[in-house]
């Protein structure tokens, strides 16, 4: 992970102004003791949470939240692909990483039954080619909100 990314994100959240009382915007702290008890969790996610930590930005746009994967005995699925859910936005959408190729998707309004998300024509959107691409898009969205009040849809 790139420390510059976390610094840019913290700077942008500190610049943001709000016309209402806000909750605390939080980046980190790092979780260096993050357990690898789930060997199927990709190394890029483990590294992110060990070096940066969870992210809670409830008042930036509609909200952005990145959290370590919860301990489960197997990955979730999106149709036929194994995925890891690692974040959400303030609208209830889920951010997931495809285990096979690293793509980051936003899942919106999908049925979830017994660990499987069932896609539809509008409920799945690619929001990053990989975790680094997603994080770069996220920091740009937070900077746009801090500088101009623009809400960017990830």
Image (spheres, rainbow, N blue to C red):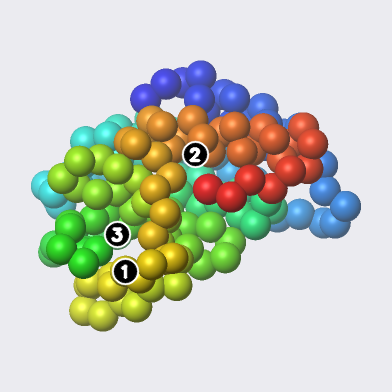
**Residue beneath disc 1:** 119
> Does dot 3 land on a helix, a strand or a loop?
loop
Label whose residue precedes the other's in the sequence (1 or 2): 2
> Does dot 1 land on a helix, a strand or a loop?
loop
**Residue beneath disc 2:** 28
Identify the residue at horizontal 59%, vertical 44% (top origin). Answer: 26
Label whose residue precedes the other's in the sequence (3 or 1): 3
Task: Return the residue found at the far right.
Answer: 19
Whole-percent x, y for residue 78 in the image: 24, 64
Identify the residue at horizontal 69%, vertical 35% (top origin). Answer: 144
The quarter holding residue 87 reads bottom left
> Does dot 2 land on a helix, a strand or a loop?
loop
Identify the residue at horizontal 85%, vertical 56% (top origin). Answer: 20
Labelled pair 1, 2 in contact (Cβ < 8 Å): no
Question: Camera-side residue: 60 or 26?
Answer: 60
Task: Give the quadrant of the N terminus.
Answer: top left
Labelled pair 3, 1 in contact (Cβ < 8 Å): no
Label whose residue precedes the other's in the sequence (3 or 2): 2
Can you say whether 75 is above or below 51 in the image? below
**Residue beneath disc 3:** 70
Task: Return the residue found at the far front.
Answer: 121
Whole-percent x, y for residue 55 in the image: 51, 45
């Amino acid at each position: 992970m790139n420390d510059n990314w976390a610094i840019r994100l913290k700077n942008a959240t500190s610049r943001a102004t709000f016309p209402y009382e806000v909750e605390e915007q939080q980046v980190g702290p790092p979780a260096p003791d993050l357990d690898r008890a789930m060997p199927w969790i990709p190394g890029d996610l483990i590294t992110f949470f060990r070096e940066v930590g969870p992210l809670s930005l409830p008042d930036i746009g509609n909200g952005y939240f990145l959290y370590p994967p919860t301990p489960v005995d197997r990955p979730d699925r999106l149709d036929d692909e194994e995925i890891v859910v690692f974040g959400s936005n303030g609208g209830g959408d889920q951010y997931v990483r495809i285990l096979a190729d690293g793509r980051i998707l936003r899942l919106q309004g999908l049925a979830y039954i017994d660990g499987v998300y069932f896609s539809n024509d509008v409920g799945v959107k690619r929001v990053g080619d990989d975790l680094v691409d997603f994080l770069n898009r996220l920091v740009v969205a937070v900077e746009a909100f801090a500088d101009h009040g623009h809400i960017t849809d990830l």
